[in-house]
Image (cartoon, rainbow, N blue to C red):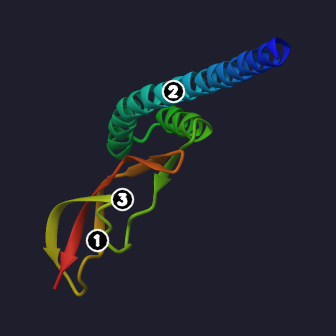
Amino acid sequence: MAKIRKNKELEDVKNQLKRALADYSNLQKRVEEDKKILVKFANAKLLVKLLEILDILEAVQKTVKNEGLYLSIKKFKEVLIAEGVQETNSQGKDFDPNFHEAVEIVSGNTNDKVVEVLTKGYTFEDKILRPARVKVSKK
């Protein structure tokens, strides 16, 4: 009888140990996932700041035709693409508040069409990094 009780206690302790190891493994996985999310958030914050610099360079390029500036912007964009940043194409599309920020409404032939992109929008790993700032038409 005592032997059966000890075997049961031993089995209970083994099961507790297995649960504790499983809990610890789950905790490790959760901590790693949290780290990845934190790094991604930090990257997104930095990328938004870099996009502001790209906007300035592209504005300068419109007035200053310089091959070096062109190549610098091209390389800048290549690096952003390699990091998972994609430019959204908004010109002529239906206005979508998930992808666009309407800054002006202009009269036009159709309702809720993007007629001009003032600031380009970007996605990062399929999430909106920065919405495009656009002019939208209304009849």
State the image quarter where residue 16 is shown.
Answer: top right
Closest to the observer: 95 or 115?
95
* Cα gap from disc 2 to disc 3, whole angstroms: 27 Å
The amino acid beneath tag 3 is Phe
- Mark 3 lies on a secondary structure that is loop
The amino acid beneath tag 2 is Asp
Mark drawn on residue 63: none
Closest to the observer: 56 or 134?
134
- Mark 1 lies on a secondary structure that is strand
Mark 1, other Cα within 10 Å: few <14 / some 14–19 / many ≥20: many
Mark drawn on residue 99: 3
**Residue 119 on image: x %, y %:** 31, 51
Indicate the quadrant containing the N terminus: top left, top right, bottom left or bottom right: top right
Closest to the observer: 55 or 48?
48
The amino acid beneath tag 1 is Val
> Mark 1 or 2 closer to N-term?
2
**Residue at mark 2:** 34
* Cα gap from disc 1 to disc 2, whole angstroms: 41 Å
**Image point 53% across, 23% down: which residue?**
35
Closest to the observer: 46 or 29?
29
> Mark 2 or 3 closer to N-term?
2
Disc 1 versus disc 2: nearer the observer: 2
Left or right of 60, for residue 4: right
